[in-house]
Image: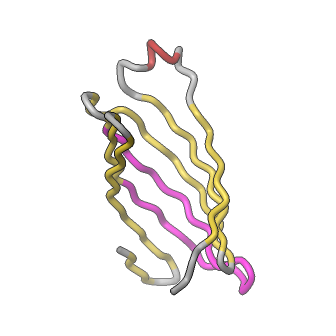
């Protein structure tokens, strides 16, 4: 859902992902500001991830740049669960290039 007020845009979401036996739930929120015509919106936010069997697995920060039919995404994943011992506090940075298909 989107809430737009005073030229700021607030987006919140819940996602459930499953692949084989693995599953996770994401709950997040982003705040965006409109930019020039070619660069429609810059947004940033936080998400919380719960993985199967681990409550409070990670906190994810994100920075998105929306323009025309595309979005550039940069996420940084901080593991906050006991899995930190397994990954030796190595967190993950992720980049994505998204093409939006319109109906």
Q: Position of residue 3 (x, y in %)?
A: 38, 78
Q: Position of residue 77 (x, y in %)?
A: 52, 38
Please report the residue visible at 36 percent of the width from the left and 18 percent of the height from the top: 82
Range shown magenta: 28-50
Image-based side of 14 in relation to 8, left or right: left
Dominant secondary-structure state across the stretch colored magenta? strand
Please report the residue visible at 45 percent of the width from the left and 29 percent of the height from the top: 79
Image-based side of 95 in relation to 47, left or right: right
Q: Is residue 99 above or below residue 24?
A: below
Depth order, front residue of 9/24: 24
Q: Is residue 29 above or below residue 85?
A: below
Please report the residue visible at 65 percent of the width from the left and 78 percent of the height from the top: 69
Image-based side of 91 in relation to 69, left or right: left
Depth order, front residue of 77/70: 70
Residue placed furthest toward the front: 20
Q: State yes or no: residue 101 in magenta.
A: no
Q: Position of residue 11 (x, y in %)?
A: 42, 69
């Amino acid at each position: 859902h989107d809430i737009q007020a005073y030229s700021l845009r607030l987006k919140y979401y819940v996602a459930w992902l499953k692949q084989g036996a693995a599953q996770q739930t994401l709950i997040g929120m982003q705040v965006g500001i409109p930019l020039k015509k070619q660069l429609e919106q810059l947004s940033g936010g936080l998400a919380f991830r719960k993985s199967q069997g681990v409550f409070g697995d990670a906190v994810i920060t994100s920075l998105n740049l929306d323009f025309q039919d595309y979005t550039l995404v940069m996420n940084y994943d901080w593991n906050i669960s006991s899995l930190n011992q397994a990954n030796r506090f190595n967190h993950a940075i992720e980049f994505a290039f998204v093409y939006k298909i319109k109906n």
